[in-house]
Amino acid sequence: MKIGIFGGSFNPPHKMHKNIAKSLIKKGYVDKVIFVPTGTKYEYKPNLISNEKRVAMLSLLIEKERNMIISKYELQEKMVYTYETLRYFKTIYNKDDLYFICGADNFSYIDEWQNSKEILQNYKILVIKRKTDFIKPLLEKYKKYKKNIIITPIKEKTISSTKIRNFFKQNNNIKARLYIDKKVYNYIKENHLYN
């Protein structure tokens, strides 16, 4: 089986997150996607809402998707790096192929991550394009690891969780609803998140 590991803050999770996972499954890149929300101890994302609330929203987002699950592995009382997460899943799925799902914007500086060589050498990386990305320079930069880099035809729309949070802060419910699953939207409003 081909397992896709999809990490992120999911603060909040939005329609594009699910669309990426569905597209990767539909096109045969992976058979299953595991969403791995970043824990609140992750020092590069200081404004995360609670682990519980982000997991609850992810659960609502993918509740009808049989090939998508959530892992709480990174929701620890310490910072967890990507290489540690991939090592963990390699022990769980030791007979399967692991694929790390990564937006091109993050992939562009993956060499700055902790133990980046381990990630690039040992795991297949599914790169999701954005409209503003320049893929050729990235392939040149990481040509040593090209056998593990898969540029998918899936494009991520230029919407981010940051923009969505701003819509809620501005009370722009119409725009927020365009990008958020209805149940996730209702959860955010009921719990007064991002006001």
Image (cartoon, rainbow, N blue to C red):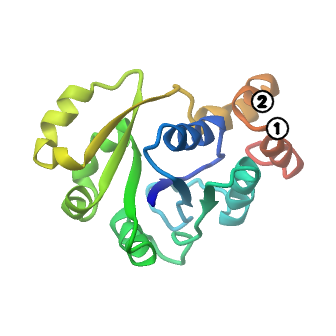
Dot 1, how many residues are within 10 Å of its Cα: few (below 14), some (14-19), or many (20+)? Answer: some
Farthest residue toward the left?
144
In the rendered image, residue 33, in percent from the top left (x then y), is placed at 54, 54
Q: Amino acid at mark 2?
A: Arg
| Location of residue 79 with respect to 48 vertically, above or below | below
- Give me the C-alpha separation between circle 2 and circle 1: 7 Å
For the C terminus, give its image quadrant.
top right
Q: Secondary structure at mark 1?
A: helix
For residue 166, which quarter of the picture?
A: top right
Q: Nearer the viewer, residue 62 or 82?
A: 62
Q: Are marks 2 and 1 in contact (CB under 8 Å)?
A: yes
Q: Nearer the viewer, residue 149 or 194?
A: 149
Residue at the image position 75 percent from the left and 53 percent from the top: 63
Q: Amino acid at mark 1?
A: Lys
| Location of residue 35 with respect to 93 vertically, above or below | above
For the N terminus, give its image quadrant.
bottom left
Say which residue label 1 marks.
Answer: 182
In the rendered image, residue 121, in percent from the top left (x then y), is placed at 19, 59
The numbered disc on residue 117 is: none
Q: Secondary structure at mark 2?
A: helix
In the rendered image, residue 151, in percent from the top left (x then y), is placed at 32, 35
| Location of residue 73 with respect to 192 vertically, above or below | below
Q: Nearer the viewer, mark 2 or mark 1?
A: 1
Residue at the image position 49 percent from the left and 55 percent from the top: 7
Residue at the image position 68 percent from the left and 57 percent from the top: 54
In the rendered image, residue 155, in percent from the top left (x then y), is placed at 46, 27
Say which residue label 2 marks.
Answer: 177
Residue at the image position 54 percent from the left and 39 percent from the top: 26
Side (left or right) of 50 relative to 19? right
